[in-house]
Image (spheres, rainbow, N blue to C red):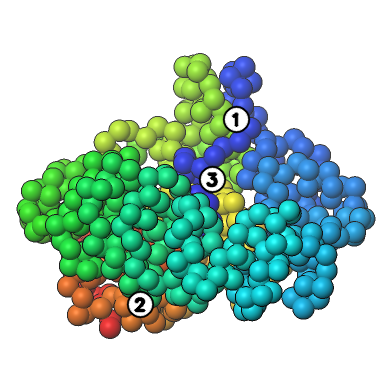
Amino acid sequence: MRKFLLFLCCGIALCVNVLCAENVKKPPHKTTNIPIGQEITLNYLKSQPAGISRDFYIWLFLQQNISAKEAKEAYNLATRKNAQLFGLYYKKGDNKTLSRKTICQRMRTETLLKEDPKCIALALTTKRAESFDRETLKRLSTNVKPYNQKLSKDLQILASKDPFKTLITQDARTFAGFYFAISQSYRERLNFKIPQETFVRFINEHNKNFERALRHIIITPALERFNHSLAKMDPKEILKSIDAEVSFYLGLNAMRFGEKQKALEYFLHSKETSKHSFNRNRATFWAFLASNDGQYLESLSNSRVVDVYTLASLEMTNKEPKFNIAYDVQTHKKKAHWDIKNPFEWVKIRDSFKATKDKEVSKQLLLSVNNENTKPHYVWLNREAGVEYFLMPYQEVFATFSNDKKALLYALGRQESLFIPTAISTSYALGVMQLMPFNVRAIAKELNQENKVSYLDMFDPNINISYAEYFTRPLEREFSHPLFIAYAYNGGPGFTRRLLSKNYLFQKSNALDPWYSLEMIPYEESRVYGKKVIANYVIYQKKLGKNISLLELLNQTLMH
């Protein structure tokens, strides 16, 4: 499912309220989960560790028949006070007085412009002001300056005779702020060549928001003149000032305009400065595409990491892999003594394991997940260096699917949650397959299970995976290819339809495709997600008896 931050369960998300070492001298006590139909209580919430899991239960609690006082108390317990929680809290609250900012923001534009400058400064956006005439923009820029200097500057740029020329006289921070404040259609008015000295100046300011804007510009084909001027830059002027990600995208842009030698310099810099193996392998693979030098494929084929780039290099070199894949781990045959369907049980074990320095406590916590039905948890705590884990748990529910469907669901589930059954994302995607609550409701309604299945049932792998399988049926019918299904699963069907309607992606006539299109997906999370899922898919298909060529599979994406 589409999510805006990394998953709680995957070991790379922020874990809040980690338990202190002195509090973990014995394994966590058993916590009773809330049965279907039973209400969550405020005392229950207070007794649980702070974090995303409790935030989700607070979200559920705020939908119950509770008092304004209870709503406020629960809301204040939340770690991440997002719009979902605030909306429910506000509806339950006894103070319905809107803030001045909210009142101003709700005004129609013509009404807002009649208000005092402070109200305008609170509510007017650069995007809303794009259609204003120059005199209005100048007046507003002056009036709002004491209250909102950034808005004032943006309005000043909009009011200029040549916004692009004005914009490139500013600093990198202003450029980026303006770029992200305007609409996509207005951004196309910035399609001019950027002078090298200006670009070098911006790069040397090391502004992260500018670097993000630069990556966005490069994956926006409508800004061709701007991007063409980037391709003409001398890499030596900026290599010492750019990070691995900026360097990679400048290399990709250089490839687009046929500047292969410059692209190679960028890719090699990205390779040398990347902190993560996935990005390092990506840069190495593109160094091969830029140079046709087999040494880069040789390097990748010796990698002990599984990803789309190493799998491609192994096919191209016809070599045997060096990585070590584990599809299963040896654990005790018994079942866990704790409720694996209760998010708080796993949170307490995980956070206690991370917090303690006591070897005996660590041993006991590891023992608590050394069970037949907690293999994903065991791997999470006890991952062996140099091993790539492609677990295949929950065999009972997977046995009902075809091998193709198994491979798809395992590929998605591995990327979504590493198969942790009580995974919860910051947007409250749930369980092994990270189903969004609104999708759970829709599926339950279609299956006539509205009164039988609750959100908390999504922590039961059998139910969660069955719902996910149902959810993927229309995606398979519409998009067919596992890569496009992955994009739709993560970013939504609408996103994928719009994506595939862009005739600059997945072109049969583009010598750089399909690899170029894999890197040009506009939504970053889906871009990475698709590449990881397709690699997972190939690995699982092989394990299930179908030896699929990754290169042939990717070539099947070419549609224009």
Residue at x-position 49% and y-position 56%: 170
- State the separation of the CA atoms marked 3 and 1: 13 Å
Which quadrant would residue 312 be assigned to in this image? bottom left
Which quadrant would residue 548 be assigned to in this image? bottom left
- State the separation of the CA atoms marked 3 and 2: 30 Å
Q: For mark 3, give the secondary structure.
A: helix
Q: 460 or 106, which is in the foreground?
A: 106
Question: x%, y% of residue 127?
Answer: 61, 70
- Left or right, 436 with respect to 388, comes to right
250 relative to 339, above or below: below
Q: Can residue 10 be seen in this view?
A: yes
In the rendered structure, which amino acid carries the disc numbered 1? Val
298 relative to 505, above or below: above
Residue under pointer 1: 18
Number of marks in picture: 3
Q: Nearer the viewer, mark 1 or mark 2?
A: 1
Q: Quadrant of the C terminus?
A: bottom left
In the rendered structure, which amino acid carries the disc numbered 3? Leu
Q: Earlier in the sequence, mark 1 or mark 2?
A: 1
Q: For mark 1, give the secondary structure.
A: loop
Residue under pointer 2: 480
Residue under pointer 3: 8
